[in-house]
Image (tube, grey):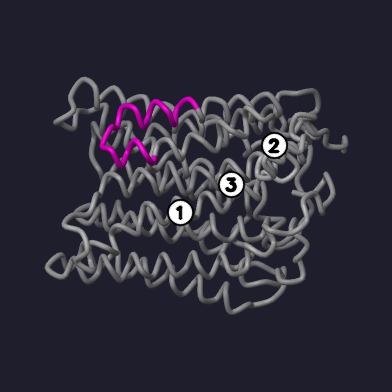
Amino acid sequence: MTAMRVDPRLQSPEVASWLDARDPWRAFFPLGVLLAWAGVFHWLLFALGAIDDFRVAFHATVQIQGFLTAIAVGFLYTFVPRRTGTEPPSSLEMVAGAAAPVALSLAAWQERPALAQALWTIGMAVVATFVVRRVRSPGGARGLPGVFVWVPWALGSGIAGAALLATAAVLDPSGEPTWWKLGRGLLLQGFVSCLVIGVGGTMLPQLTRGEPPRRGAGSRRDALAQTAAAVAFLASFPVEVHVGTRSGFALRAAVAAGVVVSSARLWRRPSAPGLHRRLIWIAAWLLPLGYAAVAAVPTLRTAVLHVVFIGSFALITLCVSLHVSLSHGGRSSLLAGWTWQVLAMALLLLAALVFRLLVGVDPEHLTWWLGSAASSFLLATLAWASLAVPAIRGRPGAFGAGSS
């Protein structure tokens, strides 16, 4: 594989170390977890009586477009150049990718949704350009399987959803028009779901069973088939809006199950050592199963969707980012064990999911369940940090250019 070339501007001592393009994950992973605290901590304050209200829209926006986005960008900036043998992110791409989730969070807290979505869209357009250019570079696609085409579709889904939400905020700020509902689905579910499918189908065989990366598997026919599947998945959102919740989620579950199970061969149980690998496998299963659960019980749509949000999105994000941190930060020996931190993180996320489900089932005790869910989730991120932060603070560039 071609050696990774670093933008000379990023080697200047005047540039902060967090902008080092050799290790984008070192900046973006802790940023993502800090944004997770921004999106959840005020719920704990509300439960404790320290503040008078909890902001549902702010919470959802910052968790998806702040926390999960920052970690996803850090992963893509790290993974794509290494797998395709192309340039690392430039200083502009680094700044844009980091500034977008932060700016969105600040604007969302000030209840300026149109501005928040516009700022996030600009940053994600830069990230999308980064990914597409490197995948389309000479030989770039040969390092990736066809299922990776879901990643550009993920970014497109997020940008389209953000544009629809911004339009709704300007034209009908007091209502929930059709394009608002469609945009919210594309952004809060479609964006991360497509990332999970694209990245999971690419990396799960290697992460969970130690199988070699599927390089050169991205034939034109395979890419076209995956594109058709991505279109069908995203079509489930207008189906949900115009036909019905049950129909939309049933289609979403069917397509997600078909693609992620077949591409990652999820019927094969994890064989590589390490608890986090089993959690990644479970999180991948919970994506289609969570959508199927909503289709089965549409009256509890918001509560049951947290099987996807916490059980799939948050769990796989924290586990994959932990794997990258330890393997690239010189602590790969910890990946083979069942450390107490990973076990605690898993149990706390499970508790957060159960408590969040109880918010919908038992709304009379909303304050108690909401506070318990928030505190469990935040403690899970602390367990993550106790393993990841020492690796993040390690020596930059301590791994080979071919690492994934």
**Pointer 1: what residue?**
287
Disc 3 marks a residue whose amino acid type is Phe
The reply to whether callout 1 and callout 3 are in contact (CB within 8 Å) is no
Q: Say which residue appears at 50% left-offset and 40% top-offset.
A: 194
**Image check: 309 left or right of 24?**
left
Q: Is 109 a magenta residue?
A: yes
x and y, in percent, of residue 314 in the image: 47, 57
Q: Nearer the viewer, mark 1 or mark 2?
A: 2
Q: Earlier in the sequence, mark 1 or mark 3?
A: 3
Q: Main secondary structure of the magenta part?
A: helix
Q: Residues within 10 Å of mark 2 (few under 14, many from 20)?
A: few
Cα gap from disc 1 to disc 3, whole angstroms: 24 Å
Q: Name above or below for residue 25 compared with residue 277.
A: above
Amino acid type for the residue under numbered disc 1:
Leu
On the image, the x and y values in percent for residue 297 come to: 24, 57
Viewer-proximal residue among 99 and 131: 99
**Residue bounds of the magenta highlight:** 105-122
Residue beneath disc 2: 15
* Residue 59 placement (x, y as % from top left): 32, 49
Q: Is residue 198 magenta?
A: no
